[in-house]
Amino acid sequence: MKKSVLSAAFGALALGVAFSAPAHAADVSACLITKTDTNPFFVKMKEGATAKAKELGVTLKSYAGKIDGDSESQVAAIESCIADGAKGILITASDTKGIVSSVKKARDAGLLVIALDTPLDPADAADATFATDNLLAGKLIGQWAKETLGDKAKEAKVGFLDLTPSQPTVDVLRDQGFMMGFGIDPKDPNKIGDENDPRIVGHDVTNGNEEGGRKAMENLLQKDPSINVIHTINEPAAVGAYQALKAVGMEKNVLIVSVDGGCPGVKSVKEGVIGATSQQYPLLMASLGIEAIKKFADTKEKPKPTEGKSFFDTGVSLVTDKPVSGVKSIDTKEGTAKCWG
């Protein structure tokens, strides 16, 4: 065990990229730790953090896991941030429960820890969360899918392409939100896979990438080739699902919905690969996070949540070129103007 943790530590350190802003009299340093450095969502997040750090004179170091679900590298990155004397950490946790003890160690050392996009479990393990309302993001695409299908929604065959077996909070919220929007009882709202609605074909994991989405879609097709609705954790997974469907001539028979709103994803909506996606704003999350760390370093003041919510809501919009009654949306032209990646 010690050997694997040590290896992870060296791996995380190798992934760390330092951006040094101009030194100020009282130098402030911060860390950004993302799930991966390949997903356009996290690339844009890093861009936002880097630009804001440069503007505010904050020294930023960024780290990323090797794949979605690589918690060991994130744990090692937190250790590095503590050792480097950082004032704060922005993190999108791969394992929202498993990372808590490391986050506690950082907070006990005096660092401000802000969860970006993905709340920790429990959420108050971090000082604050800056995120999309992921439950709402799921509800929007669920409502859209239900209204798009009309009466056929009652007989739909629904598959879920999830993130990882650890069921990170963002995964659970999007899944459960979709179910609520579609009219499926999610049972325990904090757990994936305990539903008993006969319309659900099943769940499979994708690691949030195209290859994972393709394999997961193939697995669900083997379970039930009549599947006609697919909820995906993100747009890379959605594209992989589409590839699997196209390979068997089913791409026109299945409605795919997703969450993220990156430029490639909005393009996929425009081209009909994805029916609708909930767009979130990672650049804003990260730039606000850097501002919060700088303010904390200067004043010891911690960020406050949006009124009526347990986190700071950075917004979400449904993007589709096929609007439905009762569900507010924007088209791909507006989505493209607001997209990232």
Image: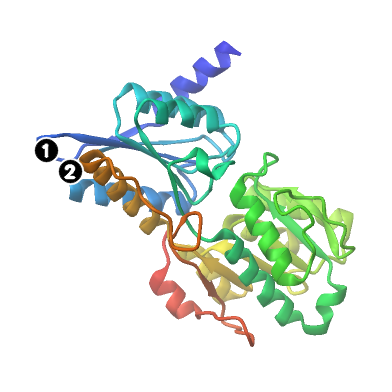
In this picture, residue 238 sits left or right of residue 19 = right
* Amino acid type, label 1: His
Judge by depth and name the residue closer to the eye, 56 or 48. 56
The relative height of residue 192 versus residue 279 in the rendered view (above or below) is: above
Query: Which quadrant of the figure contains the C terminus?
Result: bottom left
Q: Identify the residue at horizontal 50%, vertical 80% (top origin).
A: 330
Q: Position of residue 164 (x, y in %)?
A: 66, 43
Q: Which residue is mark 1?
A: 24
Residue 217's place in the image compared with 125, above or below, is below
Q: Amino acid at mark 2?
A: Gly
**Residue at 77% across, 71% down:** 183
| Residue at the image point whose x is 38% and y is 24% from the top | 80
Dot 1 or dot 2: first in sequence order is 1
State whether residue 220 is above or below residue 255: above
Residue 209 visible in this rendered orientation of the protein: no
The residue at the point 70 percent across, 49 percent down is: 190
Say which mark, if any, is on residue 69.
Answer: none
Outermost residue toward the top in this view: 2
Q: Secondary structure at mark 1?
A: loop
Most foreground residue, 21 or 107: 107
Give me the disc on residue 57: 2
Secondary element at image label 2: loop
